[in-house]
Amino acid sequence: MVRAPFYDKNGLKRGAWSVEEDNKLRSYIQRFGHGIWRELPKFAGLSRCGKSCRLRWMNYLQPNVKRGNYTEEEELMISKLHEELGNK
């Protein structure tokens, strides 16, 4: 059974994002750009706060976000830099 979305006292939805919300955010940003994040949810038709929209875009929906395992070259570079710099 799926939980109903939680709305806080200001009427903003909290919790997991639906595919429909992702599509609304993606299409709005691709069409108009992000501009001011605080005002974006109102114009995009979302019941989310601006911070939630910004984080969703930056961490999941942005087209250049790389997903998956590291390549062999990336693994070697990480190992080399770790030997040189340590845990910085």
Image (spheres, rainbow, N blue to C red):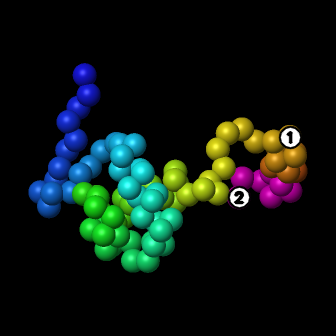
Secondary structure of the residue carrying numbered label 2: loop
Looking at the picture, tell me which residue is in the foreground, 29 or 64.
Answer: 29
- Structural distance between the alpha carbons of marks 2 and 1: 22 Å
The crowd level at tag 1 (other Cα within 10 Å; few <14, some 14-19, many 20+) is few
Residue 40: assigned label: none
Residue 68 drawn at (x, y percent) = 67, 39
Q: In terms of image quadrants, where is residue 3?
A: top left
The residue that appears at 42% across and 51% down in the rendered structure is: 23
The crowd level at tag 2 (other Cα within 10 Å; few <14, some 14-19, many 20+) is few
Q: Dividing the image into 4 quarters, which one contains the C terminus? A: bottom right
* Left or right for 12, reference 60: left
How many numbered discs sit on the rendered protein?
2
Instruction: Give the residue number, with chain letter if any, for mark 2.
Output: 88
- Say if 3 sits above or below 30 in the image: above
Any part of residue 83 in sight: no
Q: Amino acid at mark 1?
A: Glu
* Left or right for 70, reference 64: right
* Left or right for 14, reference 83: left
Looking at the picture, tell me which residue is in the foreground, 47 or 73.
Answer: 47
Q: Amino acid at mark 2?
A: Lys
Secondary structure of the residue carrying numbered label 1: helix
The residue that appears at 20% across and 44% down in the rendered structure is: 6
Any part of residue 67 in sight: yes
Residue 47 drawn at (x, y percent) = 24, 57
Instruction: Give the residue number, with chain letter if any, for mark 1.
Output: 72
Q: Which residues are magenta?
A: 81-88
